[in-house]
Image (spheres, rainbow, N blue to C red):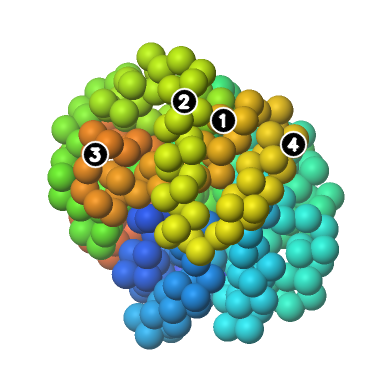
Amino acid sequence: MLDTRLTEKLGCRYPIVQTAMGWVADPRLVAGSCNAGGFGFLAGATIPADEIERDILRVKELTNQPFGVNFHMYQPNAAEIVEMVIRHGVKAVSYSRSPGPEFIRKLKDAGVVCMPTVGLPKHAIKAVELGADVVTVQGGEGGGHTGAIPTTLLIPQVVDAVGDKVPVVAAGGFKDGRGLLAAMAWGADGIAMGTRFLMTQESPVPRETLQRYIDCSNPGNIVVSKAMDGLPQRMIMNELLTELEKAGALRKLWIALRNGLAFRKHSGATVLGLLKSALAMSRDDDMTAAQAIMSANAPMIIQKAMVEGEPARGVLPSGQVAGVIDELLSCEDLINAIVQEAQQRLALLAVRAAEN
């Protein structure tokens, strides 16, 4: 029952994907997910190319299972990452904004599985037209940039749109075996989880920040805001988000420029490269200058919380599912629990069907 088109395509035991959360999806978490039978994606959109290569090699030291790398087309080192993925035999890439037909063609020619994340059926159709091998679709309950359509409505729509062509992976609000079984009932080939893996024992998130996630016991307090970059993002409400919500245009521009300079120093990107990324985003997504700069350097804002352990000074991307998670399992215990519960629930459904 748990052998699906997704497991066949990715070469993993179970149809459970660990998403590439910036500053969170590091080699230890990716290897932990893969060794437990899932498929992990390494975060490649937040670090310099040489560090990405180091992390790829580190994952290979920690697991002999296939894994993936995440990036987006606007980062200055996108071409380097594509070459690196191919050179090191990485199984798959994930991305939100399409890396363009030339990159996709190059990746597919090398046998790399292309796996974009989308939020609408029309985006899924376009992704498949561009060459996607698998489509991950995130419902509104998901963390980070997200849409307004609930997972329960969105997944069947995307399955109807492209499910006959490629495997569909459901994301947004998943944490257990009941969710996996529900997603498969909707026609998906598996589930992807970010927040649930962020809240595991292998997660590199500092305890001070992780405590904010644990303490957030009400899914209603994990809100969608456009304050950071003009695009809807789901985050745990904290001090910085409150400041951004109240800030005027000039204040937001100052915050954007301050963080942009910090990101340039960390990533090795030039000022020109950062501006080009911001301009490309503003042109394609109809953002203001401040929003585009904030989006281009959002990793630095997230880093404050996820790396430096200052949850009040960074943002806390999170799916609503954080509000119903109260224990930090290991990746192995988490995936085993999901698989066992899905099998038990399926067996119970079979008994009920037989009785009727």
Q: Earlier in the sequence, mark 3 or mark 2?
A: 2
Q: Earlier in the sequence, mark 4 or mark 1?
A: 4
Q: CA distance from mark 3 to mark 1?
A: 21 Å
The residue mark sitting in front, 3 or 2, is: 2
User: Which residue is label 2 attached to?
Assistant: 252
Residue drawn at (26%, 26%) of the image: 239
Rendering coords of residue 127 (x, y %): 75, 48
User: Which residue is label 3 attached to?
Assistant: 311
Q: Earlier in the sequence, mark 3 or mark 1?
A: 1
Q: Residues within 10 Å of mark 4 (few under 14, many from 20)?
A: few
Res. 27 image quadrant: bottom left
The residue mark sitting in front, 4 or 1, is: 1
Q: CA distance from mark 3 to mark 4?
A: 31 Å
Up the image or down, 123 lies above or below 14; here it is: above
Do the residues bearing badges 1 and 2 touch, measured as CB atoms within 8 Å?
yes
Residue drawn at (51%, 64%) of the image: 268
Q: Which mark is residue 284?
A: 4
User: Which residue is label 1 attached to?
Assistant: 291
